[in-house]
């Protein structure tokens, strides 16, 4: 990673000035500011961000999303805050979900009794499929 400018004064007159904690240290010749290269955090594929947000909007909790996708519930919460999402109120319905492989999903869908009486969505989840079903609360 090549440093192009000082983060303080934006000058390009910088020189290497040693190594601190396995990171290159730099000195700005214009303002005499010492700085190191910022660590690059682990970047999560946007596919998982999108899936997590979809599942949140479908009514799943942060911890359920964590168990399904394998990303921390705190990270999911931060994404929800970052994208300013609000979960719609589901007072009459509640989501249930199951994860199937391809053959299990085909067998499940063959039974017509599973297809009536509730809304349903199927979404890809890596090499498996997630079936989310909304059922009315029993009075």
Image (tube, rainbow, N blue to C red):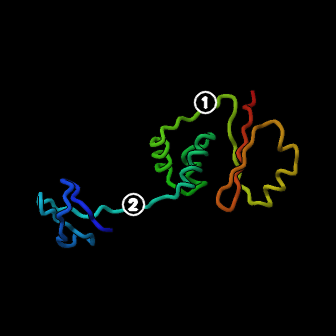
Q: Secondary structure at mark 2?
A: loop
Pick whichever of labels 1 and 2 is earlier in the sequence. Answer: 2
Picture coordinates of residue 90 (x, y %)? 64, 31
* Mark pair 1, 2: CA separation: 35 Å
Residue positioned 64% across, 60% down in the render: 126
- Quarter of the image where one finds residue 101: bottom right
Q: Secondary structure at mark 1?
A: loop
Q: Is residue 133 left or right of residue 29?
A: right
Q: Is residue 111 left or right of residue 119?
A: right
Q: Is residue 132 left or right of residue 32?
A: right
Q: Nearer the viewer, residue 30 or 20?
A: 30
Picture coordinates of residue 13 (x, y %)? 17, 64
Residue positioned 59% across, 48% down in the render: 64
Which numbered disc covers residue 41?
2
Above or below, 92 relative to 128 = above
Q: Nearer the viewer, residue 8 or 130?
A: 8
Mark 1 touches mark 2? (CB < 8 Å): no
Q: Nearer the viewer, residue 11 or 27?
A: 11
Query: Where is the N terminus found, in terms of image quarters?
Result: bottom left
> Of all residues shown, which one is farthest toward the front?
12
Picture coordinates of residue 46 (x, y %)? 53, 54
Q: Which residue is mark 1?
A: 89
Q: Nearer the viewer, residue 8 or 120?
A: 8
> Of all residues shown, which one is farthest toward the top?
139
């Amino acid at each position: 990673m090549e440093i192009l400018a000082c983060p303080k004064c934006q000058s390009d007159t910088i020189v290497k000035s040693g190594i601190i904690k396995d990171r290159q240290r730099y000195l700005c010749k214009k303002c005499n500011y010492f700085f190191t290269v910022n660590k690059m955090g682990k970047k999560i594929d946007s596919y998982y961000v999108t899936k997590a947000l979809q599942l949140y909007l479908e009514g799943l909790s942060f911890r359920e999303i964590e168990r399904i996708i394998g990303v921390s519930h705190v990270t999911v919460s931060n994404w929800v805050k970052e994208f300013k999402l609000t979960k719609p109120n589901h007072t009459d319905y509640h989501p249930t979900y199951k994860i199937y492989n391809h053959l299990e999903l085909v067998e499940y869908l063959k039974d017509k009794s599973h297809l009536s009486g509730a809304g349903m969505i199927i979404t890809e989840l890596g090499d498996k499929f997630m079936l989310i079903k909304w059922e009315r609360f029993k009075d």
